[in-house]
Amino acid sequence: MVSIEKLEQELKQENLNSIYLLYGEELFLLENNLNKIRKLFGKTIKGINFILIDDTNVKELIQDIETPAFGYEKKLIIARNTRVI
């Protein structure tokens, strides 16, 4: 687990890791760091190298992870509010 300070330092150095799990009650910090990650990630095309997962399509998460980014070396998947009742 990485502290928020270490995460912010990594992002400031423009060093992106493969996977992040951001959680907590400080919504401002979560959104701020998510926006930094998105900015560092570069150009995103929804459905190609950018997937947004929520409670309506959480069951597709594994499939989206396993599917290649079609012409891009990496893919950004953001899953939020995925609690299924």
Image (cartoon, rainbow, N blue to C red):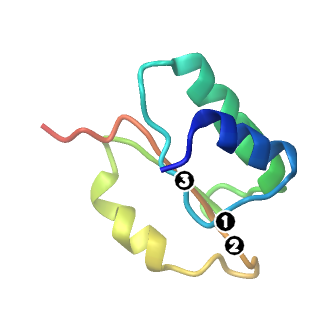
Q: Quadrant of residue 32?
A: top right
Query: Is residue 13 shown to the viewer in this render?
Result: yes
Q: Residue at coordinates 38% horizontally, 73% vertically from top-left?
A: 63
Relative to 70, is 42 above or below? above
Residue under circle 1? Answer: 49
Q: Amino acid at mark 2?
A: Lys
Give the label on residue 20, or none. Answer: 3
Q: Earlier in the sequence, mark 1 or mark 2?
A: 1
Check the image and name the residue furthest to the left: 85
Give the label on residue 34, or none. Answer: none
Q: Earlier in the sequence, mark 2 or mark 3?
A: 3
Q: Residue at coordinates 52% horizontally, 19% vertically from top-left?
A: 27
Q: Left or right: 52 with respect to 12?
A: left
Query: Is residue 38 shown to the viewer in this render?
Result: no
Few, some or many residues within 10 Å of mark 1 (<14, 14–19, 20+): many
Q: Secondary structure at mark 2?
A: loop
Q: Residue at coordinates 64% horizontally, 76% vertically from top-left?
A: 69
Residue under circle 2? Answer: 74
Counting every numbered tag in the picture gives 3
Q: Left or right: 72 with respect to 2?
A: right
Q: Amino acid at mark 3?
A: Tyr
